Image (spheres, rainbow, N blue to C red):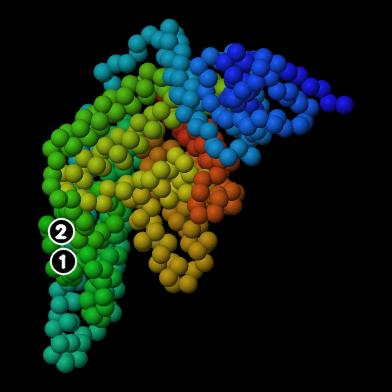
């Protein structure tokens, strides 16, 4: 039996109203008396025709339907629209700021202002460092002289070939050229490392000289390898990249061309580079200002925050107090990350862009978005493009081209990189203890673990990105810094005095 009710809403004006499921009102003309028509609320449809309208006087405010259709929670996987996490990002930034401000206040209350402009730097270190730094590029000019001889031999051979004469036997000459390049490159690295390790005590001066020596050494290798292949292509009438057409071999063997490569922000030699249309003074000055500001920030953070924390960790390291060491690593990870990020921005974004602007060097992709890396391998391919390009062009690609397995070629690349990292850290600190080498070499299993986590098409993986950041922020840099600082103090510092 159905239940019937009689509407008496607005009957004096001849209008009946009802609320629909979405909260809007229904209207119909009744043309009835006060009693009006009957509405079946159990299931029968009303006989009168209804029209949608938005009434001026909403009388029924408590009956419109809230739950009108199925919906999912916005964080559920079934949600059609992915929500923005901008608010969470802002929250994390605020938490980082507040947390680091607390560390700043704690550091000031504990140590006060400990920055001093006076540093214990020996005069002999400054003199020897300046002399070594200025002499390191001489090996590039020796490589130029070697290539000048090779180019003259190539021109002579080409002229005889064009005259249908018997071409001279060049195999012995090219072997002598390769031997001369090998001796020059070896002496370049050996002499610099010997002077830094035995003659320069201060680690900062030694680090600056060591970095310069490794950069010039890599440039010498690239200059020799590239010109060797250009020379062979010249003698065999083979095609070279189109961009080289404006300066073909051997026209590239000039002092001007060499000096441009010497200063260019790249480790890979080319006779010609893409160039920017003009020099922008304002852009250059901004980048230089950023380098100066960030360098001062790194200096302040290192001596005010990192050094006291490292000194307070020596006793725990000496006693192998693992809980305290772990706590110190976590505390050091914050300041080391800030210093590293500041150094990255100062070098790759500001410094290299300033140098590129000065030389109108056009290709300025010195890095890509490595912070989104879904695997450790992606990080090493994206954070330092100059080194990556050198390894790919002069180590990986030649090995694969000669039939070596790509995995084996990658292992060789990381072994070579590990060797360079140990030189850059161990030699200036006078502690070649293998930590930097092991840290780089053990990137290989991390790459094997995280590469399958990366989605198809190179899309970043959340798990892979987390593994990268954990290995980078906690296990990697802070642990290496702590170990090398402990080794330095054990050899020269307060632990020796104790």
Element carrying mark 2: helix
Would residue 438 appear left or right of 116 to someone viewing this image? right
The residue beneath circle 2 is 257
Q: Position of residue 236 (x, y in %)?
A: 25, 81
Towards the viewer: 441 or 268: 268
Q: Quadrant of the N terminus?
A: top right
In the image, what residue occupies the spot 32% across and 16% down?
115
Q: According to the image, label 1 marks what residue?
A: 247
Q: In which quarter of the image is residue 253?
A: bottom left
Look at 50% across and 57% down and name the residue there.
Answer: 411
Is the residue under label 2 in contact with that under label 1 (CB below 8 Å)?
A: yes
Q: For this view, does 220 lie left or right of residue 469?
A: left
* Residue 175 in sight here: yes
Q: Residue 58 carries which label?
A: none
Number of residue marks: 2
Q: Is mark 1 on a helix, strand or loop?
A: loop
Image height check: is 15 above or below 168? above
Residue 377 position in % (x across, y down): 49, 50
Q: Can residue 314 be seen in this view?
A: no
């Amino acid at each position: 039996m159905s239940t019937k009710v009689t509407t008496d809403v607005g009957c004096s004006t001849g209008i009946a109203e009802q609320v629909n499921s979405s909260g809007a009102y229904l209207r119909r003309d009744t043309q009835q008396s006060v009693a009006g028509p009957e509405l079946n609320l159990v299931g029968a449809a009303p006989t009168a025709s209804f029209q949608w309208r938005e009434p001026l006087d909403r009388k029924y405010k408590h009956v419109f339907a809230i739950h009108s259709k199925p919906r999912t929670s916005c964080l559920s996987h079934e949600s059609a629209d992915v929500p923005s996490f901008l608010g969470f990002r802002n929250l994390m930034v605020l938490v980082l700021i507040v947390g680091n401000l607390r560390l700043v206040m704690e550091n000031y209350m504990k140590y006060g202002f400990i920055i001093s402009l006076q540093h214990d730097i020996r005069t002999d270190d400054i003199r020897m460092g300046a002399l070594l730094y200025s002499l390191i590029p001489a090996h590039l000019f020796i490589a130029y002289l070697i290539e000048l001889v090779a180019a003259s031999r190539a021109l002579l051979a080409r002229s005889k070939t064009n005259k249908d004469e018997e071409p001279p036997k060049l195999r012995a000459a090219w072997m002598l050229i390769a031997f001369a390049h090998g001796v020059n490159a070896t002496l370049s690295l050996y002499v610099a490392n010997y002077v830094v390790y035995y003659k320069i005590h201060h680690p900062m001066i030694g680090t600056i000289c060591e970095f310069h020596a490794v950069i010039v050494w890599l440039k010498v290798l690239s200059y020799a390898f590239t010109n060797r292949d250009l020379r062979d292509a010249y003698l065999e009438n083979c095609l070279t990249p189109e961009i080289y057409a404006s300066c073909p071999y051997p026209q590239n063997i000039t002092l001007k061309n060499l000096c441009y490569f010497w200063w260019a922000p790249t480790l890979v030699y080319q006779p010609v580079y893409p160039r920017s249309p003009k020099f922008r003074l304002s852009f250059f000055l901004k980048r230089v200002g950023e380098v100066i500001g960030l360098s001062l920030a790194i200096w302040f953070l290192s001596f005010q925050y990192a050094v006291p924390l490292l000194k307070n960790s020596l006793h725990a390291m000496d006693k192998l107090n693992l809980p305290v060491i772990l706590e110190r690593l976590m505390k050091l990870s914050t300041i080391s990350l800030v210093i590293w990020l500041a150094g990255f921005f100062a070098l790759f974004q500001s410094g290299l862009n300033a140098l590129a602007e000065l030389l109108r060097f056009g290709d300025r992709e010195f890095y890509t978005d490595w912070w989104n890396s879904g695997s450790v391998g992606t990080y090493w391919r994206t954070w330092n493009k100059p080194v990556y390009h050198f390894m790919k062009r002069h180590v990986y690609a030649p090995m694969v081209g000669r039939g070596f397995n790509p995995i084996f070629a990658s292992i060789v690349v990381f072994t070579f990189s590990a060797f360079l990292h140990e030189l850059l850290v161990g030699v200036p600190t006078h502690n070649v203890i293998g930590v930097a080498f092991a840290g780089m070499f053990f990137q290989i299993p991390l790459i094997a673990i995280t590469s399958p986590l990366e989605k198809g098409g190179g899309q970043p993986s959340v798990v892979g990105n987390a593994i990268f950041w954990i290995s980078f922020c906690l296990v990697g840099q802070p642990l290496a810094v702590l170990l090398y600082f402990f080794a330095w103090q054990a050899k020269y510092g307060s632990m020796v005095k104790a």
